[in-house]
Image (cartoon, rainbow, N blue to C red):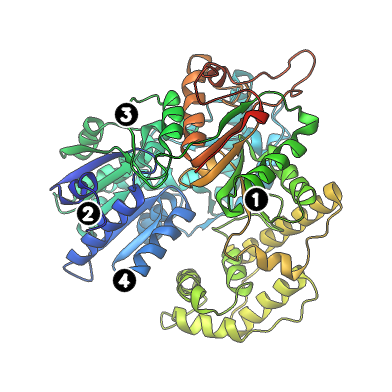
Amino acid sequence: MHELNSEQRAALDTKGDVLLVACPGSGKTRTLIQKIALELSKASSHRKFVVALTYTHVAAEEIRDRIDAMGIDTSQLWVGTIHSFCLTWILRPYSLYHESLRHGFGVVDIFESDEMLDEIASRHLPLKNHHDCKYYATRTGYEFDRSTSPDRIEPLKKTIAEYHEQLLSRSLIDFEMMLKFSHDLLVSHAPIARRLGALFQFIAIDEYQDTREIQYFIVGMIIRESMDRTGLFIVGDPNQAIFGSLGGVAKSAAEISLLTGRIIKPLALHQNYRSSQQIIDYFGHFAVEPMFIEASGEWKDWTSSIVHDVSISKTDLVKGVADLVRHNIETLRINPESIAVIAPWWIHLASITRALVQELPEYEFNGPGLSPFGQNLDNFWYKVARIALTFAAPDMFRKRMRWAQELVDELTASGYASDSLTARELLKITNEITSAGKNGTEFLINFFEEFCHRLGFEPQPGSELSEQRDSFFRRMENRISDIQKRENVDVDDLETFRKVFRPRRGVVVSTIHGVKGAEFDSVIAFGLLEGFVPHFNEPEAEKDHIAKKLLFVIGSRARKNLFLVSETGRGNQWHPKYQSNVLEAVHDHPYTSRSINLVTSSP
């Protein structure tokens, strides 16, 4: 508690339910973790649980790691995404009460889901593939990504309906069906929510601004039915609500009170311990919810480089970004791990990552295009691969134990292991496995075979584990082949595979959405053009509003320096892409310039 400032302490000490609006760099996660630790210390029974809902698996891992590092007993703690929560606490225990799930169900692998949507969408023009099929669950059904153009709505309805029909015929569900079915169970069987309300002593929600209506309702029903037995602590920042196209909404304390039937007390954190005051003043231009933010950290008086460059062409983009990376490392003396290269979409990054590796061989990069298989964190065999490709070292013990526990839970739930199997026993078994594979693929094939042999099971053909294994290798083979064709690089070697799960090193390359929650000394962002920031299909009336949130996230990631690039040459002669209107509007800001040559920095 001595590490917390007065605002953070107030958030912990306030009696009742809290909505904490936290500015960037305000110690939100630290406050959340301290609150979780406090509630764990109050757990009166082994039947009471503290639940922390995060937006991503990465955020869940961070919370687990930091709670573990505090030496606190976490046996009563459950941390995960809302989808994992629904699967663990609602669908698996109560599937018998849902018509579509009562005879058993599995969760479709993301890669297999994409394959199914690719095939179905290709028959419903003008749709092409799964990228055109973004949808999300609501309380009444399913809605489509707001960037979906009107001419695609009807084909998309048919595609999703056929997709759901195919899934259910195979007793499978995807993540959106997971939410919808969980909602339906809570609505039709109120005792489920009542039972969960009795189990949960406390529920914390991180990044509430990206929470969807159906997710608020699921948690709200549990809180309402708990009869004041379950506490609620919600944290986030409305200015960083960048998942609105997929239904994310930052509800007010009054709106959440209506859902839960409880008084929600609004509090705020205003002190930024991350950035210089110059950086804060700059990204403050993009705030859609006005909020006073004060620089209070080590770098508050740093003289920052804040540059908007409009001179780099698309053809020279790799060299331009490479020059910026080199400038930060060699001139500004920034550690490579503290530099991020950001773009609006993954498609902008896949090729540039390897191009940067070739342009700057003396430095390491961590980004898309470097992994031989996509991060399908919910695939069982991806979880096995994490253990297979890491070593039994002291600094990895807690993490590998958690991974092992996830495998034990899934094997037990699937009937492939007895309740007596422990995470420690499974980890001992995997540590003893040796694989003679010459390359990464052979290594994993052999490891998976021996894994099944040692544990005495073999996934039955057509079972969820069997299909996930096939999907895991198909996805990996496609990715390796694609990289080989596109860039003439062979990534099917064991060392490349092992690098995926090592602690991250080098310059981070990611999307705007991917770096939310992270922080860096220097941020380099490109592709800041109309049609990219925001997406060209966003509603016209909301485009500037959405662009501001995206630019707010970019700017607020930086501690010291911010380099923004609106490159020329995108689009075509009929429809060229120009710099973001919102970004252009702040060109006259005293800390910005149009040319990269004017960069200056001092400690």
Query: Is any atom of residue 557 visible in this view?
Result: yes
Q: Nearer the viewer, residue 176 or 11?
A: 11
Q: Nearer the viewer, mark 2 or mark 3?
A: 3
Name the residue that disc number 3 marks. Answer: 291
Q: Residues within 10 Å of mark 4 (few under 14, many from 20)?
A: few
Q: Quadrant of residue 47?
A: bottom left
Q: Amino acid at mark 1?
A: Gly
Name the residue that disc number 2 marks. Answer: 197
Is residue 454 shown above or below 215?
Answer: below
Query: Is any atom of residue 456 visible in this view?
Result: no
Q: Residue at position x 30%, y 45% from top? A: 219
Please provide percent x and percent y for residue 549.
Answer: 46, 29
Name the residue that disc number 4 marks. Answer: 75
Please provide percent x and percent y for residue 124.
Answer: 69, 30
Q: Secondary structure at mark 2?
A: helix
Name the residue that disc number 1 marks. Answer: 367
Q: Nearer the viewer, mark 3 or mark 4?
A: 3
Q: Quadrant of residue 130?
A: top right
Is residue 440 shown above or below 477?
Answer: below
Measured Cα–Cα span from mark 2 to mark 3: 34 Å
